[in-house]
Amino acid sequence: MNLLITGITTQSSIAYAITEEAMEQGHQVILTNPPGRQLSILERVAKRLPAEPVDILPMDVTDPDQVTETAGKVAAHWGHVDGLLHSIAYAPGDALGGNFLNTSWEDVATAIHVSGYSLKALAVGFRELMAAAPHGAGVVSLTFDASRAWPVYDWMGSAKAVLENSTKYLARDLGGDGIRVNAISAGPVKSLAGGSIPGFDQIADGWAASAPLGWDTKDASAVAGPALFLMSPAARAVTGTTLHVDGGYHAMGAPL
């Protein structure tokens, strides 16, 4: 498969684990780098992967022109894209950590734009390339159960609710092009992204006690297989869903 992967920050990233597994299976990968971070940082992280990415491209998902430009650069390498991973989330510090009632609209809007609306921006920006995939294409986003309120997660939780609901509408509107759109609600992983949320350990440290299958907060590889499945033709009849990859935590009513 030809896969476009966003959101790698460090080796602890869920996106890194997915990319690593994809390369080990022989898939071709193009990575994207967000604004505000030197490209050389991602290039150093990418050197630890089992294979060399086809390309590493800068892309600001809040800039429609840059998304279009990036799609053009991807098209120069490939005639189609089989899978797209949306692993993008950001909220200003004021929107996290227990400040829910006092967060400004400007900060809320930023969180929703980057973490939620960007899924639509990517899906539309790469629609033509994905529609050209011979066996259909799969868009997969990463979320953190937006069906409930979490300590400290605040407006990022609301942004993830936008992401999860947008998954259903994108599935509706892109299905005619053979494009599937699904989300993975993963258990907490102690990555750079998780560590940037004040009080994140409060959520992560008690997770395994309520997960029937257990959960390792330091191992993102459990998410890789399900993500690649959803991007593959094996998931040809799966769209508009949020798949929980969390050790079974979501199904429990109380700690075990």
Image (cartoon, rainbow, N blue to C red):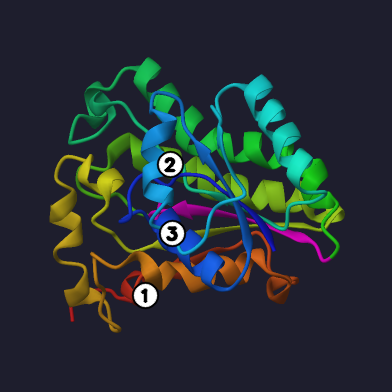
Circle 3 residue: 49
State whether residue 135 is above or below residue 211: above
Residue in the image at 83% along x and 51% along y? 131
Residue 245 showing in the rendered view: no
State whether residue 208 is above or below residue 45: below
Mark 2 or mark 1: whose residue is earlier in sequence: 2
Q: Marks 1/3: CA distance?
A: 34 Å
Q: Which residues are magenta?
A: 135-147
Q: Quadrant of the N terminus?
A: bottom right
At label 1, the amino acid type is: Ala
Q: Which mark is residue 251?
A: 1
Left or right placement of residue 224 versus residue 54 in this view? left
Q: Marks 2/3: CA distance?
A: 10 Å
Q: Marks 2/1: CA distance?
A: 39 Å
- Image quadrant assignment for residue 178: bottom right
Q: Which mark is residue 43?
A: 2
Mark 2 or mark 3: whose residue is earlier in sequence: 2
Indicate whether residue 96 is drawn in magenta. no
At label 2, the amino acid type is: Glu
Indicate whether residue 146 is drawn in magenta. yes
Q: Secondary structure at mark 1?
A: helix
- Image quadrant assignment for residue 129: top right
